[in-house]
Amino acid sequence: MKPIWIVDDDQSIRFVLEKALLREELPTRSFTNSRDVLAALGNATEETAPQVLVSDIRMPGGSGLDLLDAVKEKYPALPVIIMTAFSDLDSAVSAFQGGAFEYLPKPFDLPKAVELIRRAVEESQREEFREEQMAQTPEMLGQAPAMQDVFRAIGRLSQSNVTVMITGESGSGKELVARALHKHSSRASGPFVAINTAAIPKDLLESELFGHERGAFTGAQTMRRGRFEQADGGTLFLDEIGDMPFDLQTRLLRVLSDGHFYRVGGHTAVKTNVRVIAATHQNLEQRVKDGAFREDLFHRLNVIRLRLPALRERREDVPMLTRHFLQQSALQLGVEPKRISDGALAWIGTFAFPGNVRQLENMCHWLTVMTPAQLIEPKDLPPEVGVAAGGTVELPVVPATALANPVATELSAHVTAPALVGGTATWEAGLEADAKTLLATARNDIWDELTRRFESRLILAALSATRGRRIEAAQRLGIGRNTITRKIQELGLE
């Protein structure tokens, strides 16, 4: 495993963290200032590069936030943990805006610090796995005529710098199309930068897109490059463009017109060379009529329109996609791939999949975790798929109050031995029965296993109800935006 890099001018902090991580069999490398870190990064190979970077904020020769910006430019996926005193709360906010994985307040509890670093290591390894899988697997799958039309369009558009508008329902794979357009273009050696304009609060979106100067607002302690600058020489993918605030649409139009913009709080024009690909699930023509979207921006973005079909329009692809996602889920979880019977595939093929390919992928991940046998039969399918397909599914009776709750329905339908309360199965009773079954085995991870199942279903239900909008899902669940993002990563729900 690659080492954890620790950066702090305080020798005692370095010593304590080194010893604690050594006990966990985690290799380390320590530095006293950011200058030495940047020099080491410049000479690092794939094997010697850091797995995780843990850095103090206040150090001689350059702050931890400056180091964060420099590191993220070269290693955007590297988890960076910022150590900060309680008085540096504004700095912590800046750290998150700069892309930090988490911040660690001083003085810290050593076991919690080690737990946080281990979580960052796991995230880093998952990211490496995802990158490896992306390199090994096809970008997109599909034999249906509608998808073949999409592939042909990607081939024609890939050698052009023309602006493309991708339309299609949520979960249909719009970002995959954007990545394919970038990968096969003359800009493939440049960066591909994606941003979901609906997932970022309005007051932060301008800074995310255009960057900000130091002191532009509270917490802006360093200059930060926005997505347009990060994508210079490459492709910028603007997802859910229909939800962009009206006042920001004017700034976007100006950048698309002449390639110049100003950072928030800045007075010097910045020039960028970016190909823009936009996507939306909304009817932009109607948004223009309603006065919610600028007509001139619509025409600027709508140079070439590429419509992505919904999954129900390409049902012949469902068996191939199902088997592919089952293989991917097994690889991610480190288990033997599940097989699926023809009967189960037939039932899946009749389901409308309102969440499209993303919903099918999530379902395959769920089946990999929840199906007790290696062969997936119709009785193992989630309740909504079984009911949609018709026929009789062997599910326990669930009260009407539970049916309103997708988590309750899922848990009660798939526990090992649903218990009866007053003659009716409840998800709580089913959970208790499942716990008893697991307790009868030699396993010692039952708490983690059942907690992961519960949290996964709860988050997936919230994301389904909000059509994938994480911030809204977090608000509905009563948790923070960072919490739901972290949980999605930890539970492998990406």
Image (spheres, rainbow, N blue to C red):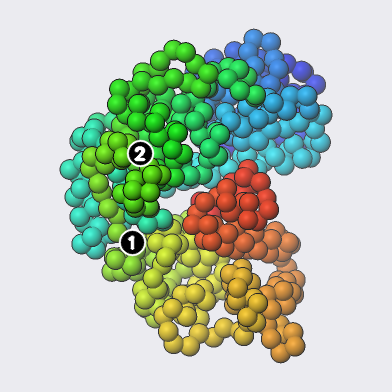
Which residue is nearer to you in this view: 436 or 19?
A: 436
- Sequence-wise first label, 1 or 2: 2
Give coordinates of residue 410: x percent, y percent.
Answer: 59, 72
SS at badge 2? loop
Which residue is nearer to you in this view: 130 or 69?
A: 69
Residue appearing at x 52%, y 51% in the figure: 469
Give coordinates of residue 486: x percent, y percent.
Answer: 61, 46
Give coordinates of residue 3: x percent, y percent.
Answer: 61, 31
Q: Residues within 10 Å of mark 2 (few under 14, many from 20)?
A: many
Which residue is nearer to you in this view: 105 or 136?
A: 105
To which quarter of the image does residue 106 belong?
Answer: top right
Q: Work out which quarter of the rendered image holds the N terminus and state it.
A: top right
Q: Which residue is mark 2?
A: 294
Residue 383 located left or right of residue 82: left
Is residue 444 shown above or below 71?
Answer: below
To which quarter of the image does residue 48 belong?
Answer: top right
SS at badge 1? loop
Q: Residues within 10 Å of mark 1 (few under 14, many from 20)?
A: many
Is residue 398 shown above or below 461?
Answer: below
Residue 236 located left or right of residue 375: left
Q: Is residue 436 visible?
A: yes
Residue appearing at x 33%, y 48% in the figure: 289
Q: Amino acid at mark 1?
A: Ala
Give coordinates of residue 262: x percent, y percent.
Answer: 44, 20
Residue appearing at x 61%, y 70% in the figure: 405
In this view, the residue farthest toward the top is: 61
Residue 451 located left or right of residue 122: right
Q: Which residue is mark 1?
A: 310
